[in-house]
Image (cartoon, grey):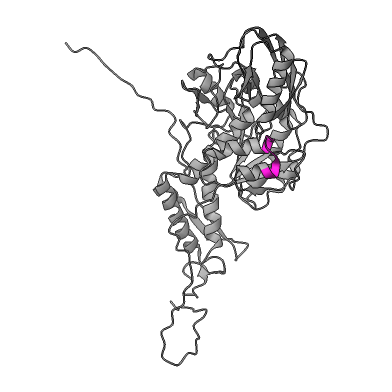
């Protein structure tokens, strides 16, 4: 085989030792996909980021500067940062919808305090202690509540008091604001100071938040960048349809950028089943913590950060049993195995409430459970298949974009010697075998020999500059069920 040099002169005559170097790919392993988290949401009205355009967020201070403390984007970024490891976070800022409505709730205080104490107010599960002194009137207690809420710049609400009626207003417009929960005395150790009474009308029940922003333009601007994990704070059908449309577009063979979109949920199991009935999308994973005080939108962001960090370190590994950071256990709907099985088969994930008040992941499940023809399918059931495919698509694309394929000419197998920049179907196949060996070693494919035996590479019959490659991959599955049978008998 002749050796071609790019820099060593062919007509050199004087004595010398030339050493020319050139990086090449030998097909010894997979290029590893760098995960990126994309957080969708709104910003404070006083800020002016470039809307509908993804932008890298350096840290939480950067998020506060760009989007405002207590904004939807800052709330989500803070949740995603908790367990994201080294995975970068990008924000996708959206304007409020022109017809959007901010959600509100109230605490109505009555009476006069007859003893000092602390009223525990909770917004989205976060405790705001309010000091009450003996003799305080309802108006004074209301003022103290509004002052304490105003002092916490990272709360997603503002508060104003009028003669003991404290109105909490979500900082952004839209239906997503209804996810913020307003409570008092959430813990058994909390109590209302003697002499006063407080009536709670939850956020969204005084004025319901309405009209989330539209996502189509923003999602259409994702370009060629891999955003592997997406945080969607919106539960309305229009938003989820936009996510599905974008996911379908980004899995196109010419785009090759599929994502996992996480959505949080805190309503009942029955309502979740109803919600799932309107969805059938492999790109959407709904993570429920039934009855949690943590807003569903924060559950989505915290799960995305955790999931992305696991996939970055160990591609294709399930997140089962991992604690979702800073998410509070639900107070209702403790599910039986039958309940969980029903939810999974309907296209829903499930989680576990722990005794210490934390939440761990059970199964993460996509909402796709029907074929386009309406038949039952479990091909896309578990979310872990998405990062498995992301890893392989990235590896295939970057392997065959690099040397020796980037400036190659095509020769048929067995057609005789050619220059070093030729590739043949056998070359393509050998690199594919190396990729499969790497996938098996990483635990994301199984039945190596079966896959390799089925690999086919051939020059296209109608296009001599095209080589077609088939890899009949067998993805590995996460361990979900272990069935043991214990037989026993007394021996006489």
Q: Quadrant of the C terminus?
A: top left
Count of numbered circles in the view = 0
Span of residues in magenta: 65-73
Of all residues, the one furthest to the left in this rendering is: 492
Q: Identify whether 416 is placed above or below 278.
A: below
Q: Please indicate, yes or no, whether residue 193 appears anywhere in the rendered image.
A: yes
| The one of 85 and 489 positioned closer to us in this rendering | 85
The image shows residue 37 at horizontal and vertical percentages of 59, 43
| The one of 130 and 406 positioned closer to us in this rendering | 130
The image shows residue 338 at horizontal and vertical percentages of 50, 18
| The one of 320 and 169 positioned closer to us in this rendering | 169
Of all residues, the one furthest to the right in this rendering is: 99
The image shows residue 356 at horizontal and vertical percentages of 47, 22
Q: Residue at x 56, y 61 (%)?
A: 401
Of all residues, the one furthest to the bottom in this rendering is: 14
Q: Is residue 316 left or right of residue 42?
A: left
Q: Identify whether 300 is placed above or below 409.
A: above
Q: Identify whether 56 is placed above or below 399.
A: above
Q: Is residue 414 left or right of residue 465?
A: left
Q: Quadrant of the N terminus?
A: bottom left
Q: Where on the picture, by quarter, is residue 77? A: top right
Q: Where on the picture, by quarter, is residue 233? A: top right
Q: Identify whether 105 is placed above or below 18.
A: above
Q: Residue at x 52, y 66 (%)?
A: 403
The image shows residue 196 at horizontal and vertical percentages of 67, 9
């Amino acid at each position: 085989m002749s050796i071609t040099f790019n820099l060593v002169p062919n007509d050199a005559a004087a004595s010398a030792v030339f050493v020319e170097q050139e990086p090449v790919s030998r097909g010894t392993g997979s290029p590893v996909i760098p995960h990126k988290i994309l957080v969708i949401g709104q910003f404070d009205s006083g800020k002016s980021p470039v809307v509908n355009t993804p932008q890298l967020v350096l840290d939480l201070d950067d998020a506060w500067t760009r989007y405002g403390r207590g904004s939807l984007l800052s709330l989500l970024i803070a949740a995603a940062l908790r367990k994201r490891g080294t995975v970068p976070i990008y924000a996708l800022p959206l304007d409020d919808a022109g017809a959007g409505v901010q959600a509100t709730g109230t605490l109505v205080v009555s009476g006069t305090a007859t003893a000092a104490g602390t009223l525990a107010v909770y917004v989205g599960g976060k405790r705001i202690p309010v000091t009450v002194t003996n003799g305080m009137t309802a108006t004074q207690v209301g003022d103290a509540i509004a002052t304490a809420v105003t002092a916490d710049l990272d709360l997603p609400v503002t508060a104003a008091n009028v003669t003991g009626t404290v109105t909490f207003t979500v900082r952004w417009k839209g239906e997503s604001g209804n996810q913020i929960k307003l409570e008092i005395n959430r813990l058994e150790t909390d109590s209302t100071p003697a002499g006063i009474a407080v009536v709670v009308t939850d956020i969204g029940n005084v004025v319901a938040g309405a009209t989330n922003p539209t996502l189509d333009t923003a999602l259409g601007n994702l370009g060629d960048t891999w955003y592997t994990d997406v945080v969607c704070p919106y539960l309305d059908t229009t938003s989820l349809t936009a996510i599905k449309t974008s996911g379908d577009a980004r899995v196109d063979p010419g785009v090759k950028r599929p994502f996992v979109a996480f959505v949080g949920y805190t309503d009942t199991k029955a309502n979740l089943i109803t919600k799932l009935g309107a969805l059938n999308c492999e790109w959407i994973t709904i993570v429920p913590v039934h009855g949690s005080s943590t807003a569903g939108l924060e559950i989505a962001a915290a799960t995305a950060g955790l999931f992305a960090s696991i996939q970055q370190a160990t591609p294709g590994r399930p997140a089962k049993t991992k604690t979702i950071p800073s998410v509070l256990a639900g107070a209702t709907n403790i599910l039986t195995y039958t309940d969980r099985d029903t939810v999974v088969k309907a296209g829903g994930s499930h989680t576990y409430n722990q005794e210490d008040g934390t939440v761990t992941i059970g199964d993460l499940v996509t909402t796709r459970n029907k074929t386009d023809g309406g038949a039952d399918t479990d091909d896309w059931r578990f979310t872990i298949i998405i990062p498995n495919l992301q890893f392989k698509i990235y590896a295939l694309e970057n392997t065959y974009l690099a040397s020796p394929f980037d400036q190659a000419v095509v020769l048929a197998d067995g057609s005789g010697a050619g220059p070093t920049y030729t590739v043949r179907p056998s070359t393509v196949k050998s690199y594919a075998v190396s990729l499969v060996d790497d996938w098996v070693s990483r635990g994301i494919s199984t039945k190596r020999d079966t896959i390799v035996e089925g690999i086919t590479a051939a020059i296209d019959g109608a296009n001599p500059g095209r080589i077609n490659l088939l890899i009949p991959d067998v993805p590995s599955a996460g361990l979900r069920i272990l069935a043991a049978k214990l037989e026993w008998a007394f021996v006489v």
